[in-house]
Image (cartoon, helix red, strand yellow):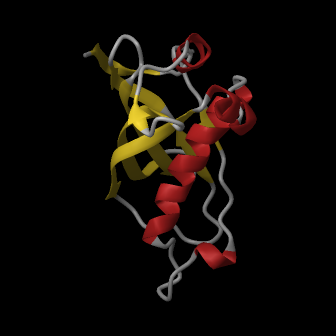
Amino acid sequence: MEKYIKNPEIRWSDLDPNFHLRHSVYYDYGANCRVYFLEEYGLTAAIMQQLHFGPILFREEAIFRREIKMGDKLTIDLQVTKSRKDFSRWSITHQIFKNENILAAVINVDGAWINTIERKLATPPPQIVAIFDKMPKAEGFEWQ
């Protein structure tokens, strides 16, 4: 897969007192994009509950480039930048563009999978690996 893109909508409640996007909303957009991808490829919350596996984040970082205001048209993408071959640990980047080609922010996350019964990091089962392997790989992607 080359690209995975979503088009989040800006809500009035997403704005701060300066009338631009609150910093925490950028993180929400990234989380939603990742969850939408998993859901669209068959890894729903119900299946994660059945498998007793869920994603966790070790690090989440936003780099703000341009302010986003009400009325801007947004796109957010998703790409894996690095991963272990078993997808037990991974890094994902998102780019948020406004008005088609203006880079507004970059979100980087490092994460892993946790067994929700044992409450320990674990290698995901084959169903999760197969779906995660479909995620677009960034230019310069590297196996760890």
Residue 101 is left or right of residue 63, and the answer is right
Please state, as top left, top right, bottom left or bottom right, where the C terminus lies in the image: top left
Indicate whether 7 appears above or below 37: below
Indicate whether 130 appears above or below 39: above
x%, y% of residue 64? 34, 60
x%, y% of residue 84? 33, 17
Q: Residue furthest bottom?
A: 17
Q: Nearer the viewer, residue 88 or 78?
A: 88
Figure quadrant of residue 104 = bottom left
Q: Nearer the viewer, residue 12 or 42?
A: 42
Indicate whether 42 appears above or below 129: below
Residue at position x 61%, y 35% in the image: 5
Residue at position x 57%, y 20% in the image: 128
Please state, as top left, top right, bottom left or bottom right, where the N terminus lies in the image: top right
Residue at position x 66%, y 47% in the image: 7
Residue at position x 59%, y 42% in the image: 33
Q: Residue furthest front?
A: 118
x%, y% of residue 107? 39, 48
Residue 131 is left or right of residue 64, and the answer is right
Figure quadrant of residue 83 = top left
Q: Nearer the viewer, residue 105 or 34?
A: 34
x%, y% of residue 25? 52, 64
